[in-house]
Image: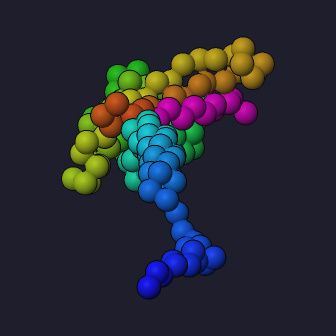
Amino acid sequence: MCMIKEESAHRQSGFTLVELLIFIVVVGAGLAGILSVMDNSVKSSADPMIRKQAIAIAESVLEEVLQKAYTDPDNSPAVVEASRDLWDDVDDYNGQTQAAFAFPASLSGYALTIAVTADNTTLGIEAKRVRVTVTRGTESMVLTGYRTNY
């Protein structure tokens, strides 16, 4: 007896091994590209908490300095007083560092510098520019304000 094999008209659906390999390669290349972009952005960004703390320090110091008088109200000598409580004008803060401010131990890694200079050209009036710089590691924040003689 001779058996004739019937060919099945039913075809299996699915992917071939070649199609599956191509899919894996394409998806892998896409993921590698996305991860490399994320890696570069993470490396170039600063730690947000460090940046926020540095800005908060700079803002508070700048606000303190700008609230002082433009000129010395008691005409004391230009020698820097030992106590911050005696600083009564903007120029008393010039050249000061974090040593003059009571930073808590958790902020001991931050460095602070203050520069006060006469700047009568930027605003077109008699003014002093106050530049507060807060640094930690390689990150540095600089805030600038002007105290005018009004």
Q: Is residue 27 above or below residue 87?
A: below
Q: Position of residue 87 (x, y in %)?
A: 42, 37
Q: Indicate left or right for 53 with 144 as reference.
A: left
Magenta stretch: includes residue 124: no
Residue extending farthest to the top is: 121
Q: Nearer the viewer, residue 92 or 48?
A: 48
Q: Is residue 102 visible?
A: yes
- Quarter of the rendering occupied by the C terminus: top right
Q: Nearer the viewer, residue 17 or 148?
A: 17
Looking at the image, which residue is at 52% across and 78% down? 4
Looking at the image, which residue is at 59% across and 17% down? 118
Q: Position of residue 23 (x, y in %)?
A: 51, 53
Q: Is residue 125 above or below residue 84?
A: above
Q: Position of residue 61 (x, y in %)?
A: 46, 43
Residue extending farthest to the left is: 105
Q: Nearer the viewer, residue 25 or 50?
A: 25
Residue extending farthest to the right is: 124
Q: Indicate left or right for 111 with 11 as reference.
A: left
Colouring scheme, one of rainbow, by chain, secondary structure, one colour: rainbow
Q: Nearer the viewer, residue 21 or 31?
A: 21
Q: To which quarter of the image does residue 86 belong? A: top left
Extent of the magenta region: 141-150
The secondary structure making up most of the magenta span is strand
Looking at the image, which residue is at 68% across and 30% down? 148
